Image (cartoon, rainbow, N blue to C red):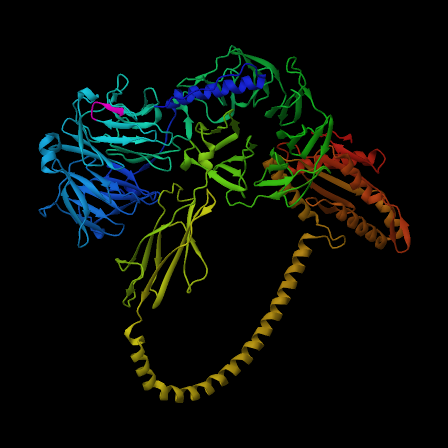
Amino acid sequence: MPVMRCPRAPARATAIDRLRRAAAGALCLLASGSALAQVASLRTYGTAEGLRSLGADCLVDDARGNVWACTYGGLYRYEGERFERVGADAGLDDAYVMNAAPTALGNGLWVTTAGNLYFWDGQAAARINDPQGAPMPFAPGHMVAAFDGGAVALSKGRAWRIGAAPGGGWQSTALFTPQIAQRWPELEDLGAVYQDQDTLWLGCGQTICRRGPDGTVRVYTAEDGVPQDAWTTFLRDRHGVLWARSPLHVLSLAPGAVRFVDHPAPAPAVMATTTRHLDLAEDSLGRVLTRSDAGILRWNGAGWDTLDTRNGLPDMPPNAMLASADGALWVSYGGLGILRWRGYGAIQNWSPANGLKGLPNWALVRDRQGGMLFGNERGIYRLAPGAATIEPVATALQTPIRDVFGLTLGPDGAVWVALYRGDLLRLAHGRVTIVTTLPHRLRRMLFDRQGRLWLCTTEGVYVIDDPAHPQPRRFTALPQVSFGDVAEDARGRLWFAGKSGLMRLDGQTVIPIRISGKMPNLLFDKLSIGRDGVLWAAVDDAGLFRGPMRDDDTLQLTAVDDPLLRDSLPYFIRHDRQGRLWVGGSSGVNVLEDGHWTGLSETDGLISEDISEGAFFEDADGSVWVGSSRGVSHLLQPDRLLAQRPVTLRIARVERGGARVMPGATLPWGQLPVRVTLSTPGSMAGPDLLRFRYRLRGRQDAWIETSSRTLDFPALGDGEQVIEVQAIDLARRTQSPVASFAFKLRPPWWRSAPALLLWLALFAGVIAAVWHWRMRAIMARKRALERLVAARTAELEADKRALELARAALHEQATHDGLTGLRNRTSILEQLALEAARAHSAGLPLAIALLDLDHFKLVNDTHGHLVGDAVLSGVADRLARNMRGSDTIGRYGGEELLAVMPGLVAPASQRLQALHDAVGARPLAIDGRSLTVTCSVGVAWLEPGESPTDLLRRADDALYRAKRQGRNRVLVAPAGTAAAPA
């Protein structure tokens, strides 16, 4: 058997090479040891999923991807999240199904029950008797195998060969001649059969027998390494090794070997108690699995590993096992149903059951010694190479480590730890030390190519230039706002995503990026840069955006038009070394590879779909770690998980009035509904991610979409009926070919050709006479009604237009000032209350400005009130045109105006000066006169918990102080009641 080999280090290597080798070595140990402690992601199928019996004696798959289960309640086929019974309507009357063996092409199934042998051809089951015409009873176990175009079945201890009968159907004959049976008495007590190409392996008596292609028989004895036992199961693995199973032994026979080798179970487990449910299965990695009293045994090339309750499996031995062709592992437990291990062999899950106590998990990294570190709300945890459990990292710090939001491996080989509260720690040689405590909460950290450590916080960015002498300094070139992410492009330039937009750092120069495109806002939070030069970003509201980087400091961003990403809020955006984009959110992980998105969720084996903030790490071997609210998932084989698997759709059956409809059938007329049942063999997509669309071709052109696998059509018209159906896998972004089902309905007798001729002859004359009389009356009535309708319509349209004009005028009068056209006092105060509530809820800035025209009374006294009104109107027009898209201005009273400016970040000196200059920067031309008008401005920013009234009071106080200090001034009120000049 093959043994896993770990890579050897070259004679000379860089520091990065040594780190990668350590990680690869740790993965090697994980794969051979601690991987057994992973928690299985199990999907249980029971009565709610169609099974009448919670236990299967056999699980098999065929060449077409169908999974079959033999139960006390009949034979079942997996149809995609459900099991459907193949029962009496298909000719399979027996309830207790013992075993099933598919044909090589998957176009049929041999089925053994307690009393009969059947062959099911996909539509109906045919019963097969022994040569005397008597039924064949069967015991539990592997009693039938497809062989040579037919089958070999073991009934009452004897072997029967099933072949095609001359007149059609099947016939049975004895497999062994009387001479061979007399020479080998073990052939009269057969307990299992296995087809190995053109060879048959049999459990015969208390030993193993082999029937060669030429019909010769060999009986293996203790001299051949076969102890006396009841041999019930055989398997030829992909390496050519033959495996044999009995209640107490598992043997293997290597290619070319002449003697079997026994592989006893590790203590204290024993192989199994006496039972015939002793399946052998081979998983996608070529590992053989079988049952023991302790759970499932898995051969690792040198010995058995045990999968049991530590992996989340039930505390009981399984009845049957199947490693299907698509890599899934199916296991049946008596009384529990059928379990599918989601992501088996491709995903390992780690949770509190493995010692990972803190949830959720935000940070992931592998240390220099090859251990895997996890950061969560309780602290730092470590999975040592080869360990089966995760242990907390001990610390001598007086303050407990909480809310570990970031982990990264520094160029010095130490692991740097970021706590959300602002502490920066360093883990080296098993010792945790405090580097510094920042005054703000930490969001993200990154070592750039120069070895500098960048720290994104909720109040700006800090940098440590030399990790050997860690002295963080505030990087003042960036604004003091929240930054959620930082990335380095291929040219070594740093890109920052923050609440003031996207910014790029070239050397020591910060360059704001001008964003164009339809964006909900510019509050950036996440970003990642692909090796193709495309930048991906996320903003606060929702959605994912992309755009190619350019050298002119502009970025045209386009929303990603994908149904699962359009309204999502990404928790991380990261590229791996192969160029794939990973996007984690509240509904799993979506991966972009070669222009195709693939969604990964609990259905694929993730421990949870609630992915944690920033919880992504790519290992040295290309595997990926993802943290979530329930644990950490290790994606061992991303290529396998992301492989394109088009969904398969099959129309399982069509029924009309409860009766089965065959393809191409012609049915009598009747007002009976038609029901179509759909199947998606092998599909693991959940009902929320698998959709179906259907239509009646030629009768209903538009597609109808549904999530139900059962389609009901009401009574159909006569003629040809063609039902077209297509399945859509939303997670895989794939769809099946269109499947169609055609049949015909005869017309009713009164619509037959003779009946139509009779109706025509009887009513032709009457219809002609009545038609002429009726048409004249109808036309006269129609003309009268048209005149009435036209008149009434004109009246209604006139009334409607008058009502709409009146309503618009009333609304304008109620909310706007008649002189300036701005919002009136009531309306602008309502807008202020709305923006204040929004700012408190979202934590965004809000500024207001009270503007008072200087010496306005002098204007009225000197030039008259009409000129004063014109001045007010002109100033209002200038200010309205100076407002930003989200700003609002209204007449607060007299010559006072109030501007509400959401999102304006203090101190905003240029913006306030522009507002002030809009009034007095140039004279107003009124009635041929040029009037210079100035204003005083009082500005205040909303404080946490402050009411709109208090905000207005502070702005009014600032305005008063501006006037008192000489007018034509802009003053900003600080928090509290005192005002200070801007």
- Picture residue at 70% right of the left edge, 50% below the top: 823
Q: 634 left or right of 172?
A: right
Q: Is residue 121 above or below residue 209?
A: below
Quadrant where the image shows the C terminus: top right
Q: 72 left or right of 18?
A: left
Say if the magenta span includes residue 249: yes
- Picture residue at 34% right of the left edge, 29% below the top: 239
Q: Nearer the viewer, residue 706 or 975?
A: 706
Q: What is the span of residues highlighted in magenta in the rendered image?
A: 246-252
Q: Is residue 125 above or below residue 790?
A: above
Q: x%, y% of residue 87? A: 22, 48
Q: Is residue 55 visible?
A: no
- Picture residue at 53% right of the left edge, 20% below the top: 20
Say if the magenta span includes residue 98: no
Task: Determine the residue located farthest toward the front in the rendered image.
Answer: 214
Q: Quadrant of residue 103?
A: top left
Q: Is residue 640 above or below residue 693?
A: above
Q: x%, y% of residue 463? A: 66, 21
Q: 296 left or right of 617?
A: left
Q: Nearer the viewer, residue 764 or 13?
A: 13
Q: Nearer the viewer, residue 125 or 79?
A: 125
Quadrant where the image shows the N terminus: top left
Q: Quadrant of residue 750?
A: bottom left
Q: Nearer the viewer, residue 771 or 707?
A: 707
Q: Is residue 924 above or below residue 405?
A: below
Q: x%, y% of residue 476? A: 72, 25
Task: Give the mark count.
Answer: 0
Q: 700 left or right of 870?
A: left
Q: Is residue 128 visible?
A: yes
Q: x%, y% of residue 578? A: 55, 32
